[in-house]
Amino acid sequence: MATAGDWWPEMSLDAQVKAASSQEALVKTISSQEIQIKAAEDKCLRLLACRERSSGELRKRLLSAGIDVEVTEFIINRLVASGVVDDARFCRLYVESKLNQGWGVPRIIHSLAGFGIDAEDYQELLGEYLDASSELARAMDALTHYRGRARDGYTGRNRFLTARGFAPGIIYQALAVWRESEKLSI
């Protein structure tokens, strides 16, 4: 039968205790990091099961959950490398969704910043969706859905388009077209 002294015969009992405690501390550190990696990965997969998310959004959620920065970066990099997280795909889907909801370009770009997406990085991608002529058409389409109660139809429509996030120049053009159409229908 082996005793503690048999394992480290050349060490004193005091040195054996120190070695054992440092090994336990190392095992606790490794297992703690492995637990954090597993928890972070599970959290990301749960979040991604609901909807597409950007890497910046996942990073913010993991850090707010108390996950270490190193573990967070490790998990985010692994998800990006595997293609599970793709900021370009998120950007494209988000822009399409918000355009279908009648949002204007400035509002979309501003809201992308909240997800950690810099619109300048994806300008080429956004260019196919966000040109000025289609922006005016979207503003005109949004005006067809206006059901306001403002005394002054112009002011109410102006507020409506502003709340949707259209640029002032686009709002002015859309309201000019609306006024002309109102004159013709009278």
Image (cartoon, grey):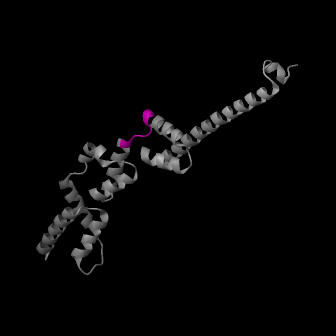
Choose between 139 and 32: the one closer to the eye: 32
Q: Quadrant of the N terminus?
A: top right
Q: Residue at x 33, y 58 (%)?
A: 101
Choose between 84 and 65: the one closer to the eye: 65
Q: Is residue 128 visible?
A: no
Q: Quadrant of the C terminus?
A: bottom left
| x then y, percent, for residue 12 | 80, 24
Q: Quadrant of residue 135?
A: bottom left
Q: Residue at x 28, y 66 (%)?
A: 162
Whether the magenta-drawn stretch holds residue 85 is answered as yes
Does 25 sit left or right of 180 as displayed? right
| x then y, percent, for residue 3 | 86, 22
| x then y, percent, for residue 92 | 33, 46
State which region is magenta: 80-87
Where is 45 relative to 131, above or below? Answer: above
Where is 87 relative to 82, above or below? Answer: below
